[in-house]
Image (cartoon, rainbow, N blue to C red):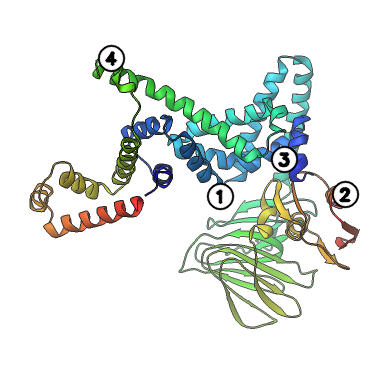
Amino acid sequence: MAEEKIIENIVNEFLDHEYPKEIQLEFQEWILNSQNRKEKDEALMKYAAGLRPEFDHQIFSQKLEKVNATIDKKKNRDNKRLFIWFSNIAAACMLLVVTTYFLTVKYATVANNQVFITSSHSKGEFQLPDGSKVILNASSRLEVPADFSDKNRHVQLDGEGYFNIKKDPDHAFMIASERVDIRVLGTIFNVKSYSSREYAEVVLERGLVEITGKSISKPIRMVPGERLVVDKSVELDEVFVDNYTSWTGKQLLIDNLPLKDILINLEHWYNVEFEATGKFDPSPRLTFMVHNESLDKVLEQIAMLTPFKYKVSDNVVYYYSE
Amino acid sequence: MYNESNLLESLAKGDRQAYNLLYLMYAPKVEVFVEKLVKNKETAEDITHNVFLQVWEKKDIISKVNSFNQYVFKMARNSVFDLFDHNLIKRRYKKAIESKGSLAVLRTESEEEIHTKDLSMLIDLTINRMPPKRKIVFLMSRKEGLSHKEIAEKLNISTKTVENHLAQAREEIRRVIS
């Protein structure tokens, strides 16, 4: 076997497994040894390039805050007074953001049923008594009946929700909505079914769900990565699930995506609809992050960087490419 | 909003949004990479934190590099190597004493020797990640030269089990070295 291949295998073996202290030192000495420096470096960089870790956005946002705080502390040595003044404002702003995030889930009781409602500009996250988690997008309503329990799991949805259902094969979780009813055993998926709109959409991230509904003749079983759209017809296709679930984060990170995927992300993030009115070039790629920016601001910048043209009217974005 | 080319330019101008974006895009990968090398989560978090402080401090230089991706992983690698170097000082000192301070250890090794060393390193790694029983059986057979029967008696398992363990161990080693 060629020397480079042996070196690559050593690096991959070590990085992919856990080892006792003594072996770790053995490897440390080996990698620091200047023999075949170039090959060792290449093997490390090749490994790094193949990394696609799943990560918790929230945890890394917190870590980022720490890094930023350290950067500010260093600056602070030059400009002490100014910094303190700004940091107070920053703290106040942060507090405001956090509070709005939690207060937006209105909680009401209707005929002993619990009802969760989000306003047109907010999202909300909460846990059901069986341990399942739900994130509601803007203008949504989730009704949890008074008799909801570990053994009787059914809710009613009007709007968009990202569900992480606690697994229990003996007691299916049922979600009823205007156009689709979903039967779940334990899984993660996104449902968009506003009674005010003419379609419903279910995207399955993990697990197995069964869909029924008034316009669905026989139950449809979905597998992960599939999207079901119900309007006048019923269609099942394969999609990139992240595009449909990114709205559940505290900020929206668009990492070098083509415009067609970006529009799907924005559609869910801002709870609007996109409608093409002419030829459209879906290929330009962009990288950006949305935090509190308005939809107008984001679209305006997309239009500056790409041939994208648009007009917003009544929560619908009409667009084409110049 | 940025495209790939103006992200680093914005960083060089001190744009904190550009910096935050680069952090969220790369820090998770860097942290996993470092953790796999140092085998400790906290150390990996500390190193990643420092690497990204450097990204901010060296933003002028970074805007001129060809690939931010490569640059940031090389910074991480350098920090990890510094740590390794530190770990090894004690060990080297001990080794130097064992070889009675002789400078002969510094002679350059032939390609043949390096090849043999690398191969035995690779085999060592493979053996050490095997399930504990298999590892013990293999070492008893190879290093202590015990027969299948002797191993079976010592570990109170059947010779068939010993043979199975050895066959699987050989298979795993064959897979990484061929």
Mark 2 near mark 4, Cβ–Cβ under 8 Å? no
Amino acid type indicated by mark 3 = Thr
Residue under label 2: A304
Front: mark 1 or 4:
4
Residue A290 visible: no
Q: Which residue is mark 1?
A: A52
Residues flagged by tags 2 and 4 on a common chain? no
Q: CA distance from mark 4 to mark 3?
A: 66 Å
Residue neighbourhood size for the residue with mark 1, other residues' Cα within 10 Å, grouped as few (<14), some (14–19), many (≥20): few
Residue that carries the numbered disc 3 in the rendered image: A99
Under tag 1, what secondary structure?
A: loop
- How packed mark 3 is, by other alpha carbons closer than 10 Å (few <14, some 14-19, many 20 or more), is few
Give the CA separation, mark 2 to mark 1.
Answer: 31 Å
- Residue B74 on image: x %, y %: 56, 34
Relative side of A39 to B163, left or right: right
Upstream in the sequence, badge 2 or badge 3?
A: 3
Which of the 4 quarters of the picture holds residue A244?
Answer: bottom right
In space, the residues marked 1 and 4 are separated at their CA atoms by 46 Å
- 4 or 3: mark nearer the eye: 4
Chain of the residue under label 2: A
Q: Is residue B107 or residue A301 the one in the foreground? A: B107
**What residue is disc 4 on?**
B101
The reply to the same-chain question for discs 2 and 3 is yes
Amino acid type at mark 4: Gly
